[in-house]
Structures are given as structure tokens and as C-alpha cells.
Amino acid sequence: MKRQPHTRSVKWVRTATPILMCIFCINVHPVKSQDLEVKKLKALSMEELMEIEVISVSKRKEKILEAASAVQVITYEDIRNSGVTSLPEALTLATNLQVAQVNASQWAISARGFNNVLANKLLVLIDGRVVYTPMYAGVFWDVQNLVLEDIERIEVISGPGGTMWGANAVNGVINIITKNTRETQGLYAEAAAGTELRGLGSLRYGGKFSDKLSYRIYGTTFRRDNTMFRDSIEATDDWQVAQTGLRLDWEPTANDAVTFQSNFYDDRPDPDGDHPVVASGSNALARWNHSVSERSDVQLQMFYDKTWRDFRNGFAEKLHTYDIEGVSRLALGKRHILLYGLGFRMMDYNVRNLELFAFKPAQKSLYLYNAFVQDEISLAKEKLRLTLGLKVERNTYTGFQYQPNVRLTWMASPSQTVWFAVSRAVRNPARIDREFFLYLTPELPFIAGSNFQSEKLIAYELGWKAKTHYNLTVSVSAFYNRYDDIRSVEPGPPPFGIPVTFGNGVKGDTHGVELFLTYPVTSSWKLRFGYTYLNKDLTLKPGSADMNNGTAESNDPNDQALLQSTVQLFKGLRLGTVLRYVGRLPEPYVSEYADLDVSIALKVTRRIELNVTGQNLLQDHHTEFIPDNPAPKDIERGVYGKLICRF
């Protein structure tokens, strides 16, 4: 028996899945980064993993041990051994993220708090391409899809990255990096089916035009089954995705590398179970890297992104994004490494409005200009490093914004690093903050556009990283964040309190600790463990009458933990387990839960592998997050089998 869709009295209510969730979640509820060969990555010990070079902290390659930031890396091996089948699922392996599944196609993902379905303080990149919608300053996770086999690593920074990456890198940065085509030669095919993952198929082929020019093409599709209402009645929110694309890597000289990639997708998410949304799009990216020396290089990157989302009831949005960025690293003497760059982005955003539900104007061109400079200064025989950086941006809504940071890194020993950072970051207004109108009648607005300003953060961070003689690696970071001008929902004048507008009436602070460990128990048994504690205290600013009393914008657990284990039982048989604990969510209340995923992989031959994975095994079903709209759903236990072929 299936629950029938609720009757809606007016047409615009059915459109509101992404936007009203923002308003009342907002809730009126009470550089050559791929040069590390994948085969080498697989063979790394836990100690050597601290030597992996990341690029997301400072836009240049640096060892994780030396990076003055709380950064974690999810490797290809971590993803493969966990049995996850989608990009949002893979992000659950980063213990410095808050990740919750809402229904079949929606996720709430953030770092250091302020999590909701339309979280707006986390910047996400796929191979350097910013994944962003100016509708609400966040990410539509239902259209972010990849063949997981092609991911080299995912770099996850918790904490502000505004100086390097710009506005909206407030609480963190996720940078998903795919493999160079040199590492994906030959034919790869996978097919999976199960109870919740109803079907998955991927086909990828990689080849070479010459020793210097290689390519891959791929196609992938999946279908996920319905989730469940909390009263155990099946929902009708199943989700289907199809995507194809290509990538070329060309190294014309020893000092130059050129990458081109493009993707096309067609998506059918159905979060409220009434009718599938039509979400389709395409993108193309070109990047050129030129190495001058070991300490100097240049990168030029351009991308174009087109998205179309039709809510099948009259409301639709179309977005064209054009982006170009240049970055240069220059060594000045023995003590200074200067990093500087310029960027420009234009977003042409167009909506098809409803009579009572509208963005005004319907068409808007949004411009973002930026320039940044950063100087890394080596002190005290290179054991002490001072980093001074500043990004200046100009956006359409609020004009100039400044995002500086100061970082101090002390290499206490070759195996220990202590770092400290003070940063400023901003979240620029989105269209929903400034230009959204919701009407009770064609003449009477209930919600009206406002003069919303950028949200602001001052962050203080302290961290310690170490690798021991026992191959145990440790990373601990503590943070204290001060927020101002956080979005509020302000009532209009009496007697009726309408129209409601968005203001900057909330301030407050968060503090917490993040712990991450990796440990090889034996040569065939490896463990990853992470724990995060978060405390949030938000209050109203003088003069604010926020209808949510400062409780909107987020619903975060105080603590969460993850333990991932990978055991090579014997040659050809591998056992992977992921145990995750998430504390209760305060409002709307969601009880604490634990889930367990178990994946068994058998390498039948050199070319064929069989996997059986069970997900969410500890309970028949459980709630992870409750949005204001659509109705709460539970995530069910699932089992699937997968066949992998490599030729």
C-alpha cells in the first residue's frame, strides 16, 4: 500500500521543494595533482599517506603533514573498500563532514555545522569546476555523479577557505579529483543490483592517441528505490540518473600539461514523491599547467556549465555559468613563495515563474570578480612558516568583499607539525535572499525581496599532526568560529506581520574538536577512525525579531564518529566495514543512530571481481534528517551485488 500524494490547494506549493525548504529550514519550525600514480597510492602504508600531496589548502602541491589546515583525504582505496555507490555516500567517509541522507535523492552535507538540505556555507569542486547554484548558494547533490572508479581522491577541508577559493568557502571545501587518463586505460565495466540500489551500470574505455595524448570516455546510470515514511509506508521518491562524458590529457612537453573534460547528464529526482523533477545539463572544462621550476608554475583554467531544472508544474530554472581563472606561483629568493591569481565568473540565471511564486526579475546576470595574493615566508631554518593571504572579490549584490587569512606552521620535528590560523570568510547573497517573492494573492506578498547582506565568519584554528614509529598517523584540530549577519526571517509591520523578509539578524559562535587517526594493525589490516565534537550557540542581534528565534539555518549533531576497517583475508578476498555513529539532532529532533556497512570483494580472476555489500545493517530503517518539506523519510537497510570487469 502506497501513500497517496497530499492534495495541494495552490499550484506554487508543489514547486517549493527546494525553495520553501530554504525558507523554513530557514524554518518556521518551532595542479598536476593527478601525477601520483594510482598503483602507487594503493601500495602506500599509513605512514606514507601523510606524504600525499594535496592542492586544496593553498592551490599548490604540499604534503598533508605540512598543510596548515584540517584536511582529510578520501582515497580511491577508501571508496572501493567501503562499498559506497554514489558521491554523497563517499563523503560519509570524511569524518570532518556532517552528511545525512534525507530521501532517495536528497542529502544534507556541510562542515562544522549549519547543515540542512540547502546548506550554503560549503564550497564543492569537481576537478576544479565549482559546483554551485546561485538560487540558494549551495549544491544540488542529485546531479553530482561520477564513476567512482575514476576518482583518484577527495580532499576535504573543514574550516574556511575563502582566501584561496572565494565566497561560500565558509565552513569548508570539498575538492573531488579524478584520475589522469593515463591511469584509466583499457575497458572497465560494472553492473550492480539489489534491494535499494535497484540497478547500476557503468562502462568506461581509455586509450591513447600517442604517448603524450590519452583519453577516456564513459557512460553510467543507476536507479535507486523508494525510501520509507516514518510510519513504514513506502514513499514514491525513487531516483534515476544517466550521465556520459569524456576526458583528454595531453603533455606536449615535459613542462606542460593540458586537460579537457566534458560531461552530460539527465536526472529524474523525485524528493516529494509527486512527480519527478527533470534535471539535465552539461559542462566543459579546459586547464593548462606550465611548470617553470620546482618552485614556480602557472595554471590557466576555464569552464562552462549549463543546467536546466524543470519542476514539472510550471516553475523551471536555467543557468549558464562561465568561469576563467589564472594562478601563478613564483619563488622569490629562498624564503618567499608568492601565489597570486585573478578570476572572473558570470552566471546567467533565468527562471520561469508562477503567478504566486517568483524570482524578480526572472532573468538576472550575476558577476563575480576576484584577485588574490598569498606569501609563504620560511623562517627559522624552514621549521617555521608564516603564510599571509588576501582575496578581494566584487559581486553583483554587495560589491567588494575581503577575505584575509594568517597561518603559522611549525615543523616541530620531521614527523610533527603544529599550525595555527586566523581567517575571515563570507557567504554572498543568493537570489533567494534578495529577489524571492511568495504571494498570498497576486497583489499581497507573504515573502518579499530584501536588502540581505553577506554572512561573515572570523575563524580561529589550532592543529597538530604527527606520524609515529608504529605507522600511526594522528591529526587533531580545534576551532572557534564567530559568525555575524547570519540569515534571519524578519516579520513585517503589524498588525499582520507581512511581508516577511530575509535579514541579517542572527549572530553566534561555534567551537569544536576534530580527531582523525589511521593505523595499520598488520600488513593486511588497516583502520581509519575519526571523531568530531561540535557545539553551536546562536542568538538574535539587537533589533531582530527572527521568526525562528535563531534556530534556523542548521540542525547539527554535537558529536559523530566513524571507524573504517579493511582486511585482506587472503589473496583475492577482501572485507571492508564502515561503522558510523551520529548524535541526535536538536530541532527538528532526530534521535541518535548507528549504521554499519559491510562489503566483501572476491577477485575471481585477474580481470573479474565480485562484490556483495550490505548497507545500514543495524536497523530495518532509520531517520537521518528531517526537512520542513517534503515529509520526513527513513533510510532502509539494503543489500546489493556487483560484478566488475577490467580488460
Image (tube, rainbow, N blue to C red):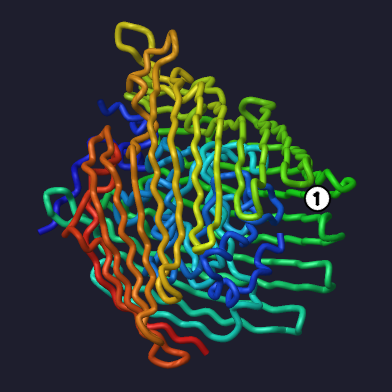
What is the residue that sits farthest to the left in this orientation? 1
Q: Residues within 10 Å of mark 1 (few under 14, many from 20)?
A: many
Residue shown at 36% from the left, 26% from the top = 439
Task: Residue 435 in the image: state x and y as whole percent.
Answer: 50, 28
Q: Position of residue 606 (x, y in %)?
A: 47, 91
At x 19% / y 48%, what residue is drawn?
Answer: 5
Camera sees residue 123: no
Quarter of the figure that contains the N terminus: bottom left
Give the secondary structure at mark 1: strand
Residue on which the image places disc 1: 329
For the view shown, which residue lies furthest in the front direction? 469
Vertical placement of residue 311 versus 294, above or below: above
Left or right? Give the position of 262 relative to 146: right
Residue 303 is situated, as x and y percent measured from the top left of the image, at 67, 55
Q: Is residue 158 left or right of residue 334?
A: left
> Image height check: is 180 above or below 630?
below
Residue at (45, 75) in percent of width and height: 523
When the figure is inspected, residue 504 is found, relative to residue 581, above or below; the finding is: above
Can you say whether 622 is above or below 504 in the image? Answer: below
470 sits left or right of 629 in the view: right
Name the kind of residue labelled 1 in the image: Arg
Viewed as shown, does residue 124 lie left or right of 32?
A: left
Residue 582 seen in this snapshot: yes
